[in-house]
Image (spheres, rainbow, N blue to C red):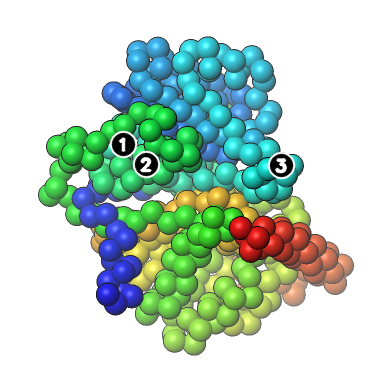
Amino acid sequence: MSSATKIKAAYTLYNKAELVRGGRSYFSILHDMIDNARMSIQLQVYIFEEDDTGKAVASKLIKAAQRGIKVQVLLDGYASKGLSKGFKNSLRANGIELRFFEPIFKGGNYYFGRRLHHKIVVCDGIVSLVGGINISDRYNDTPGTPAWLDWAIKVEGEASYELFKLCNHCFTKKTEDWITINKEDINKVLDNSLHCPIRIRRNDWVMGRNEISASYMEMLRNARHEIIIMSSYFIPSPFFRNNIIKALKKGVKIKLILAGISDVGIAKYAERYLYRWALRHGIEIHEYNHNILHGKIAVADGRVVTIGSYNINDISALASIELNLDVEEKTFTKNVHQQLMKIIDNDCSRISPISIIRSYRPSERLLQWISYETVRLLFNLFTFYFSKKRNAR
């Protein structure tokens, strides 16, 4: 079997895909999915906060459990540690199976710093939401405060069944401990006239998975014209940067949509340290200034899209558990390209060498360099630890 055939074999075919922007649209769809579930709801997310958005989602989940729907919720034990005991007890008392993914400190099979960073919701093994959106007011449109810019993909079809199995395994570590949904029953409700190739891509260094990173390398290797990348914390490794340069040498135009306003100051300073490298090689940089950018999405040649929780840095590549979906369907990929170009045209400022010279004083450049070296050191500590743990397995 050729490598190209192997890549194609990883795709499910009978799907329907919809690009969903974060904010009111996302949470409206999420609420409807929960309300319409008939058998099961699986929610796995990095951050679940006990604010208005979190309480609204929790209320929907409780009502679903009370009408007999099997509900499982898996949250990251560090990022969601702020939930009160009363809130957690209320979920469990109403029949929701709530678990937390490995705490921050090492113990047994626990890994310091390893995080459940993916964001997945699956209902009945038929419909799912995958993206970078957490359950929090920051990701919703609240009165007077627009949501952070983020994306998800709503999928109906075969890929959702594969996500059902994945969530089941992540939650229970063995599928027989939870609800069983037969693929034959799913096939009866699938519209086999739909054709939208989608594949599930995961990164989990501890478990030896590096699929999302490989998807980006495929994009850079196979693109012929243009790649647009939106990334909230863009600090690519030397290996990633070398592959970008190879794509540029082939004549591929690369456009970056990066945060102008960041929720992590040191990461933004570190990111800006790389601007001179990017501009020197002819990469376009567009800073999104309307609000905080949290999205993680890329499109190559209007042909293939990857979207999910994966940031282009070593924490996502080598530490956190991440999940993206790759999509190869013309209507969907065209829409993603149009949406990203609209954001570039209407909500971004293009960074030029002159603007860097004018904006960044020597002291600012020194701070960027210090931030970059600090972040790189932290990445090295994380990734060295994980590589040692993995080699010991």
Packing grade of label 2 (10 A; few <14, some 14-19, many >=20) is some
x and y percentages locating residue 250 in the rendered image: 44, 86
x and y percentages locating residue 212 in the rendered image: 47, 61
x and y percentages locating residue 334 in the rendered image: 31, 60
Q: CA distance from mark 1 to mark 3?
A: 33 Å
Q: In this orientation, does residue 383 appear?
A: no
Locate residue 179 relative to residue 269 in the image: left or right: left
Q: CA distance from mark 3 to mark 2?
A: 27 Å
- Per the image, the residue denoted by label 3 is 107
Outermost residue, right direction? 363
- Per the image, the residue denoted by label 1 is 125
Residue at the image position 29 percent from the left and 77 percent from the top: 2
Outermost residue, left direction? 193
Placement of 97 over or under 201, stated as above or below:
above
Amino acid at pointer 1: Gly
Nearer the camera: disc 1 or disc 3? 3
Q: Quadrant of residue 63?
A: top left
